[in-house]
Amino acid sequence: MLQKPRGTRDFLPDEMESRRHIEGLMRETAGRWGYREICTPEFEELELFTIRSGEGIIQEMYVFEDKGGRKLALRPEITAPVLRMYVNEGHVLPKPIRWFYFADCFRYERPQKGRYRQFWQFGVELIGTDTPMAEAEPVMLGSDILKASGISFVTHVGHLGLMNTMLSGLLPEEKRKVRMCLDKKDLGTLGEYLDSLKKPDLAASLVDLVRCRDITDALEIAGDMPEKEQIIEIFSILDNSGLEYTLNAGIARGLDYYTGLVFECFAENLGAENQVLGGGSYRLAHLFGGKDTPSSGFAIGFDRVMVARGGTSYIPEKVVRIVFTPEGRNWALETASFLRGRGIRTEMDLSSKSLGSQLSMAAKAADYAFIVGERESRARMVMLKNLGSGVQQEMGLEEAADEVIRSDPR
RNA sequence: GCCAGGGUGGGGUAGCUGGUCAUCCUAGGGGACUGUGGAUCCCCCGACCCGGGUUCGAGUCUCGGCCCUGGCCCCA
């Protein structure tokens, strides 16, 4: 038997509806903040991603050559395509630009809990400004969206300026190593390494900075820096927004194009892959041939959100099944059409069996049965049977539709 | 790329110190039943992940692969 490719999933209707429901909540929330949806190609020129992230990621991507010999890749993330799109056709739009996307991405990685080879991201990009408000907005919006999705999570916010100031005397390679140690909380190696660089005092203050939970103290530890006023203002905005967050100056966010504020959200109930959101301020447009443009944004790992919701159940739409006798067929068709017009999910019985048999099938798959036979047909009425309670009553179409709409979800 | 634990009908399981017929539950299909039977009864469908090895004989032991689950690495 054929198997689906490794790391991919099939979604049955129950799960699909649940996903669409959450996706809808995210869309709605982003929309209320003035963000509008965009869509970019499923695959792009390979170079788009190597420019952003380096040649090393080729082995983590689905790369292929098309019939014209072009090197292409299935998108492993969507920020680069969005910024490419901005440079291609968005740079003349009034700034700032507020966009969001919901789309699937592909990475050739080892699957594990919450990590798949085809996965979905919900993300936003705010392009064209880097005021304190513009840096803070994605943090607030991201938190708002995760809240709407119904998961428990914590938000960590940091700013690259803090650590960069403390590491300003080091070479890029040395900085990378120091960040890696801090990220892994490997203080022993960190101490030895800084000793070897003749910076023995740095280790202690770096640890202080990473553990620091107050921005005023953090600025004190890090020392003076050009972004100081900006940082104070950003955190003042966050503090006054009602957002719950933890200062974490240790957030490194991998690559070099991040410029200032960085943030991550972590969900409970999620094993090793518990980060559900990552983002910050960055500059990418100039790499794709545009003007140097400040932007900020984030991406949410949609599948991880779904995993984090766990058994949180989504209540499916109510279903009406119309069961009928041959004499009632035409009236049954009219009834179905009427109910659909009222927005009710309505299925006709397709079996042509006895009413009893139709009813037993309806009981498995529907919440209500509309029984339509000769008598109902003549009277232009329907017999509405609640399949949960067994109660049934004859009534007119309007009334029956109202009854279904008004009733509690199943 | 590395480590651990797993793959038996669609789902869940028993069998696993090798020896007919592979167990049970559930789901699914068909029939009985043509105005109430969400029932009941009967019937049916359908599985040892793939390939090599050991053996008279492999679901069972062994090796490799594939896939799943979790972890490491990575995480744009």
Image: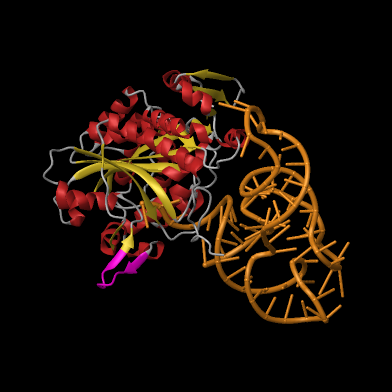
Looking at the image, which residue is at 23% across and 50% down? A83
- Picture coordinates of residue A306, whole percent (x, y): 48, 40
- Picture coordinates of residue A75, whole percent (x, y): 33, 56
The answer to which image quadrant residue A117 occupies is bottom left
> Can residue A212 be seen in this snapshot?
no
Q: Nearer the viewer, residue A213 or B11?
A: B11
Relative placement, left or right, of B47 versus A172 is right
Relative placement, left or right, of A116 versus B26 is left
Q: Which residues are magenta?
A: A63-72
Farthest left residue in view:
A92
Relative placement, left or right, of A349 versus A162 is right
Q: How many numbered discs, if any?
A: 0
- Check the image and report above or below for A289 versus A276: below
Q: Nearer the viewer, residue A310 or A410?
A: A410
Q: Nearer the viewer, residue A207 or B45?
A: B45
> Can residue A311 be seen in this snapshot?
yes
- Check the image and report above or below for A217 versus A159: above
Residue A277 among those drawn in magenta = no
Quadrant where the image shows the C terminus of chain A: top right
The answer to which image quadrant residue A360 occupies is top right
Relative placement, left or right, of A263 versus A16 is left
- Picture coordinates of residue A101, whole percent (x, y): 31, 43
- The type of colouring in the image is secondary structure
Looking at the image, which residue is at 32% across and 48% down? A167
- Check the image and report above or below for B20 versus A123: below
- Picture coordinates of residue A279, whole percent (x, y): 34, 42
Quadrant where the image shows the N terminus of chain A: bottom right
